[in-house]
Amino acid sequence: MPSPGELLELLDELQADGYDEVFIITVSSQLSGTFGVCTMAINQYEGPLRIHVIDSKNAAISEGWLSLETLRLIEEQKTSTEILAYLEHIKTNRKQYFMVDNLRLFVANGRLSGASGFIGSMFKIKPILEVNDDGKIVPFLKVRTQKKALQQMVDIVIEDLKNIKDFIVTYDTSDNIEGLQFIKDQMEQAFPGYTYFEAPITPVVGCHTGIGTVGIAYFDLTK
């Protein structure tokens, strides 16, 4: 995560470049101290920029999609009040799941809440985890094989989306292209031509998830 000094330098650069307002969208505050650092930095900032720090309560591409939506709304000349209200509504109007190869790294780095029931068999299962409405990573299901875990995960999402009129889907993976394609194929069969966003899990996040992770999330856009 950035230091307050680094962020203050960036704000000075943006001010010098002629910007007058800044939206900072961070990874979930339950997973990183970045939100706290950004809040601390803007409390020290004395310039004229109007700054908004938003806890996305998401991670990886689901966090990234919120940034893309913010850019879209800025380009549509929406007001700051409208943008902030939209982000507040949409950031938890979603479900986010991912399958990891095992829980070793999550347990070691303390990023998994309520893991006690999973730890005893963490090397024997392919756990499905969920990012809850608070932005915490919590256990969701224990499944014995990767294929069954992927199937279970995509079945849950497909069943949910049958009752949602407008949605987007996000995907991410840490080097499990075959597993990712497995769920994408089934999603396309269930919802031909739907809109999705995809990105690799970055090294920083991958230090927690490990290799082999596949994630799927959806945002309910119904108004």
Image (cartoon, rainbow, N blue to C red):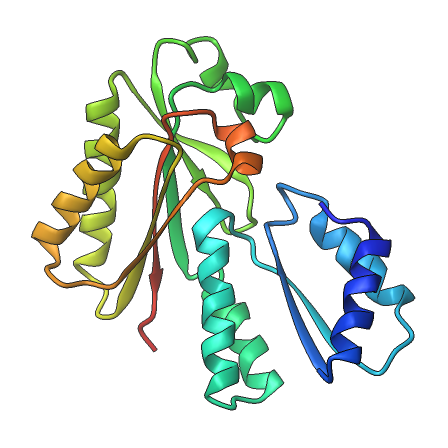
Measuring from the top left, give residue 58's x and y in whole percent.
Answer: 51, 51
Residue 25 picture location, percent across and down: 61, 62
Residue 92 appears in the picture as rendered: no
Q: Is residue 79 above or below residue 196?
A: below
Which residue appears at 71% of the width and 82% of the height?
19
Image-quadrant location for residue 213: top left
From where the camera sits, is residue 66 visible?
yes
Q: In the image, 84: left or right of 148?
A: right
Q: Residue 137 versus residue 34: which sits nearer the camera?
A: 34
Q: Is residue 69 above or below residue 198?
A: below
* Left or right of residue 223, residue 85 in this image: right
Q: Residue at x 51, y 65 (%)?
A: 67
Q: Is residue 192 left or right of residue 11?
A: left
Instruction: Name the image quarter holding the C terminus.
Output: bottom left
Q: Position of residue 203 (x, y in %)?
A: 53, 35
- In this rendering, position of residue 109 left or right of residue 89: right
Query: Against 32, is 71 above or below?
Result: below
The x, y position of residue 28, in whole percent, is: 60, 50
Front-lying residue, 172 or 148: 172
What residue is shown at x 13% (from left), y 58% (from top)?
191
Quarter of the figure that contains the N terminus: top right
Q: Residue at x 27, y 16 (%)?
A: 144
